Amino acid sequence: MDLALLPGGEGHVRLTEAPLPSSPRGDEVLVRMVYAPVNPADLLAIEGRYSFDLPADQPLGAEGAGMVEAVGDAVIDLRPGDLVMPLSRGNWCARRLLPRRHLIALPAGFDPVQAAMLRINPPTAYLLLRSAGLRPGDALVQNGAGSVVAHWVRTFAARMDVKVIDVVRTVHPAIPHALLDGDDLAERARIASGGRPIRAALDCVAGTATGRLARCLEPAGRLLLFGHLSGEPIQVRSQLLTGGGLSISGFSLRPAEAALGADGVDALFGELVALHAADPPSLPVRAIVPLSRAEEGIALGRTGGDGRVLFDLTQ
């Protein structure tokens, strides 16, 4: 029997034995999972606050990486030992049996720990920037600047000649240039922009923070809401919409990828893997915890701090 981690109700998880998957047939691939991070989306799912309903009888885990263990006779481009990244949820388990189309093959030598953190944050940042309609010479403002998504936004924006103005709720030693959120944020953000027009805002906090980001924008600016860290409804002056032409859009990765289609998703990750290989980041890891100590890993993931908590799925 294998181990798998499922929702346990009331903010907890339950570690359970799962039957071994059958041998792969046709286009199926049997993957032995190696690492999977505790993503903020996973914490929301455990607490019953995620944007979508998730099955209670299926493993949690929004992202992860594993090694091919066996392939069906219709799979010609993967072999045992290849590193792959599942596109679907359900990664907090020892093994997965998946269709080939649900896997991204990663190059030889790719760090499996870093690969486990590739599924959510890089494409989120990439597609947020694509949706923001920015041009070289523009600026954007983003809150939650200490997050991994914000790290990737800075990485991709630099390649676009877009200046990023980072905003934090408390002093963050790793981002000394970030602005503290507050009522005068708009004035300080315009100074920080160095004269570049602030045409987009990326908001993962919501609540009153949305209104402060909105006031930073040029007329006809665009605000993309992709998180709810405050747990509060957004609050924005209506005059910014009626008189300032502000547009506000929600963003969620899975629907955005669905709009791309299968070929578009393949192309997206092909580009992300190439960018990663050209300038490999080393995203911080706070702890690696065996899946058998799941509650400890979840508790540590809830405490915040620099770096992700990962499950070692081989133990």
Image (cartoon, helix red, strand yellow):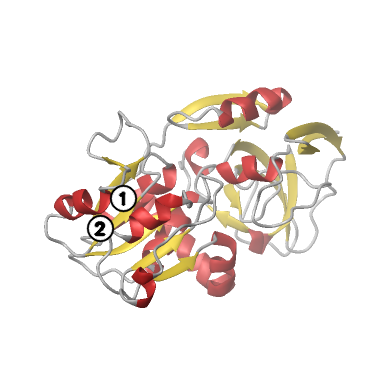
Looking at the rendered image, the quarter that the N terminus falls into is: top right
Q: Is residue 49 left or right of residue 189?
A: right
Q: Nearer the viewer, residue 199 or 217?
A: 217
Q: Give percent across and percent down for residue 120.
A: 52, 51
Residue type pointed to by label 2: Arg
Q: What residue do we see at 41% from left, 55% from top?
A: 210
Q: What residue do we see at 51% from left, 43% from top?
A: 117
Secondary structure of the residue carrying numbered label 2 = helix
Q: What residue do we see at 22% from left, 38% from top?
A: 177
Q: Give percent across and percent down for residue 180.
A: 29, 39
Looking at the rendered image, the quarter that the C terminus falls into is: top right
Residue type pointed to by label 1: Thr
Figure check: 68 above or below 137 = above
Q: Give percent across and percent down for residue 250.
A: 51, 65
Q: Which residue is mark 1?
A: 155
Residue 205 is at least partly visible in this image? yes
**Tags 1 and 2 in contact by the CB under 8 Å rule?**
yes
Disc tally is 2
Residue 273 is at least partly visible in this image? no
Q: Nearer the viewer, residue 259 or 302?
A: 302
Q: Which residue is mark 2?
A: 159
